[in-house]
Image (cartoon, rainbow, N blue to C red):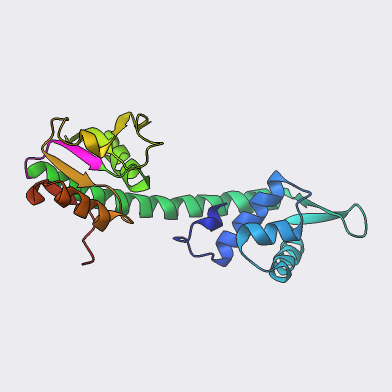
Amino acid sequence: MLIDNFYFKPTIFLKEYLILDLIEKNPHITQREISKSIGSSVSMVNFYIDEFENKGLINKNYLSTKTVEYIITNKGLERRKVLNMGYLNATQVLYNSAKLNIEQFLKQVEEKGFLNVLFYGAGEVCEIMLNTIKSSRNININVVAIIDDDVEKIGNKLVDTPIVSIDDLYKIKHEGILISSFTNNEIIYKKLINRKYPNNNILQFFTLLN
């Protein structure tokens, strides 16, 4: 669910959207299941649902004393669409800002003469950067391969880029290594230094803590 992403504050509007979306997808969903999905107490979910019913967004159909079917009304469907558009607009603004920040960094890398690079760390950060390069018309960096220490990833591809072992470090022609990991940033940096890799050719998006 969207609420699992801790970057987005669970506002009343977001919870309203999520509840309506959950009910539309599953009219037989329980309040406890909704509670778990949106990160609110069962009592708060009950409060929201009563409010939605009073506003004409949903109707309740009691199948038994304990079983309730929630039916989203046309008004509820329209409200969900409005909330969904607001959510998409907010996330698009955030995405554009983050993408611009990455593009500016990669452009600086390119201007320093690093056109053929290795990435180190085949995780989410790496995937975001690869997709940014792929979708941008302004960046001419070629990521020849991705180094990763996870043996299960080696031999696979991420965004059409091969994942290789650190043992291939000096076998691949490149001009620099960009550390594409936040959590392992410092560990990767020390590994490269220990392998006598030139410090001036190590590119970092995240600053070392120590």
Relative height, residue 91 to residue 117 (above, below): below
Horizontal arrangement in the rendering, residue 79 relative to residue 85 (left or right): right
Q: Quadrant of residue 128?
A: top left
Residue at left 31%, top 53%? 98
Residue 144 located within the stretch drawn in magenta: no
Horizontal arrangement in the rendering, residue 141 relative to residue 41 (left or right): left
Pick the front one: 138 or 105: 105
Pick the front one: 48 or 34: 34
Q: Quadrant of residue 154?
A: top left
Pick the front one: 95 or 52: 95
Relative height, residue 94 to residue 157 (above, below): below
Relative height, residue 77 to residue 4 (above, below): above
Estimate the x, y position of residue 57 in percent, counting from the top left.
Answer: 72, 56
Estimate the x, y position of residue 190 in percent, counting from the top left.
Answer: 20, 54
Estimate the x, y position of residue 127 in percent, counting from the top left.
Answer: 34, 41
Pick the front one: 103 or 55: 103
Horizontal arrangement in the rendering, residue 73 relative to residue 126 (left or right): right
Residue at left 24%, top 39%? 166
Residue at left 71%, top 56%? 33
Estimate the x, y position of residue 150 in percent, counting from the top left.
Answer: 37, 41
Residue 114 located within the stretch drawn in magenta: yes
Magenta segment boundaries in residue numbering:
112-119
Q: Does residue 108 appear anywhere in the picture? A: no
